[in-house]
Amino acid sequence: MTVALASTHSPASTRTAEPVSPIQATEIRHPARVELGKKLFFDPRLSRSGFISCNSCHNLSMGGSDNLKTSIGHKWQMGPINSPTVLNSSLNVAQFWDGRAKSLAEQAGGPIANPKEMAFTHDLAIDMLRSIPQYIEEFRAVFGTEQFTITEVTEAIAAFEETLVTPNARFDKWLEGDDDAISAQELNGYQLFRNSGCVACHHGPNLGGTSFQKMGIVEPYTTDNPEEGRIAVTGEDADRFNFKVPTLRNVELTYPYFHDGAADTLSQAVDIMGRIQLGRKFTPQENTDIVAFLKTLTGDQPQVILPILPPSSDMTPRPAPFE
Amino acid sequence: MTVALASTHSPASTRTAEPVSPIQATEIRHPARVELGKKLFFDPRLSRSGFISCNSCHNLSMGGSDNLKTSIGHKWQMGPINSPTVLNSSLNVAQFWDGRAKSLAEQAGGPIANPKEMAFTHDLAIDMLRSIPQYIEEFRAVFGTEQFTITEVTEAIAAFEETLVTPNARFDKWLEGDDDAISAQELNGYQLFRNSGCVACHHGPNLGGTSFQKMGIVEPYTTDNPEEGRIAVTGEDADRFNFKVPTLRNVELTYPYFHDGAADTLSQAVDIMGRIQLGRKFTPQENTDIVAFLKTLTGDQPQVILPILPPSSDMTPRPAPFE
């Protein structure tokens, strides 16, 4: 079967028995809302400094991440945790490593007001946006009101983020029946991945994102990072060191790995995961094959035309990054 | 005459006697070089932190500037001077406020190695790029060598920057003969601008960028900013406080104004320029009209599809932003 035929998504050829399923491109139902959300996603005026935007740490040139162990926040503060990719994040059961946000919209409000991240307040963000005639007009057109609040702001950002899916990974083509989409080595890597137990957590369309699991099931995970994961949300001692299972989609692009960003390479990540989660030491050849498989999960990256931001008006409060 | 007719650039209808001339869209002669340059322009791995790219301070969502008084550099250092727009910068006689770089390529190497800006070194930047197979392949395709140096890096960035022109401003349409392209108020503002002496410095296709002029000709300019301008290049005392005349293209988008970013609004900038450069106090109505004219200089912003950056390899040195 050719790639062209596979891309028609013929149900007859789909490998439905696999624990991983393809993802589909999203249909954009509200283009004006998405466009507004894109502007907000790229607008550093949502930060106190006027320098940090959503895209700073979820950089759409870099797999929706910043490729740093932990992010750089207001006044160069060191972030507490590795910045998860925004790509395909709509497929996650919840947002943040500890799942403390139930939705993309709820997540989007977090960093704006976090004093270690964008260090703004929701009120100041709204004051800023309401001082800009073009933003007022766009909110009116999209939400029917000029009296918008942080709710509309985060809903628009979420609408943009929902479009950030990455279909057509080579592995998806294989799932859809195209035997030639992946090599024998990559197929072997997938079979190792599936049969070793990786899929227990990394399954479904996002190969993860659907559950919280303990970091260090077989062996304890050693790290200097003080984050304790889901216990911060539930207060349950059993949730200590439980983190949301990250997606493996585009994992080639989202280094470094783990909540502390401690693994610089896929090879390191596979080795550590095998040992501490599965009690299995992969051979160098097995490791290489699994890594080769993981690189088949890189999908079409969103084609984003950089938004042109509405200019500040004379009334717009100016950022003061050094105060 | 209709706008559609005006856009055919009929020479017969061009107002050739004006001291300002339209700018034209560039023809892209080397698309692969431009694409490579675009990736480099957006790549924060050219900074020590892995966080700051050319686009951080010359943000193409924000008129090719950062809309801050002075820029934020490595470890949040306060930059010494306002970040000039990269838009139409190929039309400038030289680069930087003091003109110390003769070309865009020479300019591009500066911030990468400036310890207050991207804080990297050219050698480390090359080591980084040569560790990434896709970059090696692109440099080979564009420059015919895998042994590229900072010269090829900055030439590629310059090739991208040369495409960042903003044609089709309403004022250009008027210059091309479309009487309806600007309002009576905007035309009055232009006539004030022309007849008051602003065009002595702000002329040509870029309304500036072609000469160095003293900041404070009639009255001294008072500022806390210690920069002294062109004297740093020439050593000539006569060049103290001489700065490159900034372009007024897209000036609506490139606030705040002046080398120290001290003027937040166009109204303030027009008022100060009138007093200290021309010895003229514009009335509120004159000021309003000139500002209205200046806003007709906003052209088509470059439509930039965000590049997808080649991922680091296992060999790529990792940035250490907090060390």
Image (cartoon, coloured by chain):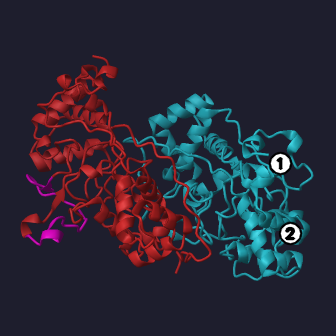
Chain colours: A red, B cyan
Q: Name the residue beneath numbered marker 2.
A: B192
Quarter of the N terminus of chain A within the rendering: top left
Q: Residue at x 93, y 52 (%)?
A: B17
Which kind of residue does numbered mark 1 sit on?
Gly
Earlier along the polypeptide chain: callout 2 or callout 1? 1
Quadrant for residue A310, please give it.
bottom right
Q: Is residue B191 visible?
A: yes
Q: Residue at x 73, y 59 (%)?
A: B296
The reply to whether the magenta stretch includes residue B298 is no
Mark 1 — on which chain does it sit? B
Helix, strand or loop at mark 2: helix
Q: Position of residue B128 (x, y in %)?
A: 49, 45
Q: Name the residue beneath numbered marker 1.
A: B177
Q: Is residue B55 above or below residue B196?
A: above
Q: Main secondary structure of the magenta part?
A: loop
- In the image: residue B309, left or right of residue A242: right
Q: Which one is in front, A222 or B183?
A: B183
- In the image: residue A36, left or right of residue B71: left
Label 2 to label 1: alpha-carbon separation:
20 Å
Mark 2 — on which chain does it sit? B
- On the same chain, marks 2 and 1? The answer is yes
Q: Residue at x 18, y 67 (%)?
A: A228
Nearer to us: label 2 or label 1: 1
Category of crowding for the residue at label 1, using alpha-carbon neighbours closer than 10 angstroms: few (below 14), some (14–19), many (at least 20): many
Magenta span: A211-236
The reply to whether the magenta stretch includes residue A214 is yes
Q: Which one is in front, B104 or A212?
A: A212
- In the image: residue A144, left or right of residue B19: left
Which kind of residue does numbered mark 2 sit on?
Leu
Q: Is residue A246 above or below residue A125?
A: above
Q: Is residue B230 visible?
A: no
Q: Position of residue A57 (x, y in %)?
A: 40, 58
